[in-house]
Amino acid sequence: MNYNDTSVPYPALPESQLMLKVGCEKCLELPKSYDEVVTERDGEHLYDTSHHSFHLENCRFCSQIYLNQFYEEIADGGEYLMWNAWIPLTSEEVNLIRDNVSNDIRDASFGDWLKNFMLQRPAVYICLPNGEFIRG
């Protein structure tokens, strides 16, 4: 697949579906700390570099699948600033991602494709570098 193609087959979501009615009360609740995040990686590393990665994660309570994006940058002075974001996926979106996954987990064009996929709707929540969780 040509991930740089401008006709990338993202599901076009109407505005009314930007926040999908998926998941359970536990995985949709805004965590107060990283220890309260109820998703866990299912072992699928979709894209992984030292400072940027994407994984599929499942809610431990309802099995809702999320796309998790981790991003890290090094600030002046050497401080590591890290972000995490989670969006829920429909089964069609999970299949679309799995059908298009690159064989190379460091394929930058696939990483860009996933980054654009994340921009299709707000995240359920985002963990900021200071550890605070906010809605996407």
Image (cartoon, helix red, strand yellow):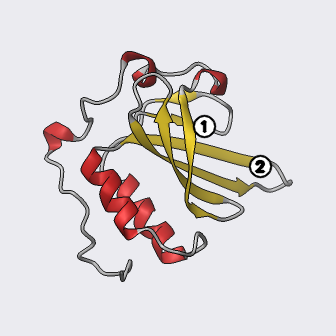
Q: Is residue 15 above or below residue 111?
A: above
Q: How many marks?
A: 2
Residue beneath the point at 76% across and 54% down: 75
Number of other residues with Cα within 10 Å of mark 1, as a class: few under 14, some 14 to 19, many 20 or more: some
Determine which residue is flagged by label 2.
80
Residue beneath the point at 80% across and 56% down: 76
Horizontal relation, residue 92 to residue 88: left or right: left
Residue beneath the point at 71% across and 47% down: 81
Element type at mark 1: loop
* Spot occupied by residue 131 in the image (x, y as percentages of width and height): 66, 30
Horizontal relation, residue 120 to residue 83: left or right: left
* Spot occupied by residue 77 in the image (x, y as percentages of width and height): 86, 54
Number of other residues with Cα within 10 Å of mark 2, as a class: few under 14, some 14 to 19, many 20 or more: few
Determine which residue is flagged by label 1.
128
Q: Quadrant of the N terminus?
A: bottom left
Q: Is residue 134 above or below residue 108?
A: above
Q: Quadrant of the C terminus?
A: top left
Distance from disc 1 to disc 2, alpha carbons, whole Å, reads 12 Å
Amino acid type, residue under disc 2 in the picture: Tyr
Quarter holding residue 51: bottom right
Asked if residue 123 can be seen in this view, the reply is no
* Spot occupied by residue 39 in the image (x, y as percentages of width and height): 53, 32
* Spot occupied by residue 31 in the image (x, y as percentages of width and height): 54, 21
